[in-house]
Amino acid sequence: MVEADGARTVYSADAHIRVWEVVSCEGRSRICREDVINPNTGAVMRSETEAVWTLPPAGALPASQIAASVEALNAGVITEMDFDDRLWDVETRASIGSRAEFKIDPMTGIVTRCEGRACP
């Protein structure tokens, strides 16, 4: 939803109790915003300015496409995704005690590493 019109780039998304916190930036700006979003309705409940230090490279796959590729691995529900150290870091939970942490190339969507019991 945040990327739908193509104007914003998602930098991170974290699931919390009953909300998602999503940091997104307009274009290539590092002055971004953090939206607290209702996961059932998609409504933005609160928004504030957030600065980020590192954006995905120009031409990188959008976060929504990275998330879809992780979901296709059936390794659980995505609980967090952040762009850090030139890679997407995506965490999933399959069940209590079963998790996976993926490192994903932002340009190709290829999983470069997976750690945890829920790794495929």
Image (spheres, grey):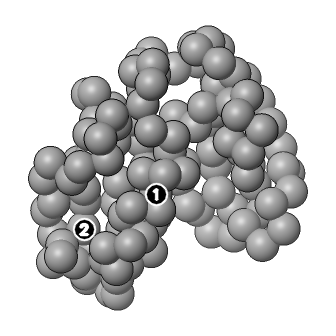
What number of labels is visible?
2
Residue 101 versus residue 87: which sits nearer the camera? 87
Please tell me whether residue 100 is drawn above or below residue 44 in the rendered image: below
Percent position of residue 66, x then y: 42, 51
Percent position of residue 15, x then y: 56, 61
Type of the residue with mark 2: Ala
Q: Which residue is mark 2?
A: 100
Tell me the quarter of the picture where residue 5 sits: top right
- Frontmost of labels 2 and 1 is 1
On screen, residue 57 versus residue 28, left or right, reads left
Q: Residue at x 51, y 40 (%)?
A: 62
On the question of residue 9 being in view, the answer is yes
N-terminal of the two: label 2 or label 1?
1
Task: Check contact, mark 2 vs mark 1: CB within 8 A.
Answer: no
Disc 2 is placed on an element classified as strand
Q: Residue at x 26, y 28 (%)?
A: 85
Q: Residues within 10 Å of mark 1 (few under 14, many from 20)?
A: some
Residue 102 versus residue 27: which sits nearer the camera? 27
Q: Residue at x 45, y 19 (%)?
A: 58
Q: Residue at x 73, y 52 (%)?
A: 1
Q: Which residue is mark 1?
A: 67
Disc 1 is placed on an element classified as helix
Type of the residue with mark 1: Ala
Percent position of residue 16, x then y: 58, 62
Please tell me whether residue 92 is drawn above or below residue 13 in the rendered image: below
Please tell me whether residue 97 is drawn above or below residue 54 in the rendered image: below
On the question of residue 93 being in view, the answer is no
Separation (CA) of disc 2 from disc 1: 14 Å
Looking at the rendering, in which quadrant would you find the C terminus?
bottom left
On screen, residue 75 versus residue 27, left or right, reads left
Percent position of residue 32, x then y: 66, 22
Q: Residues within 10 Å of mark 2 (few under 14, many from 20)?
A: many
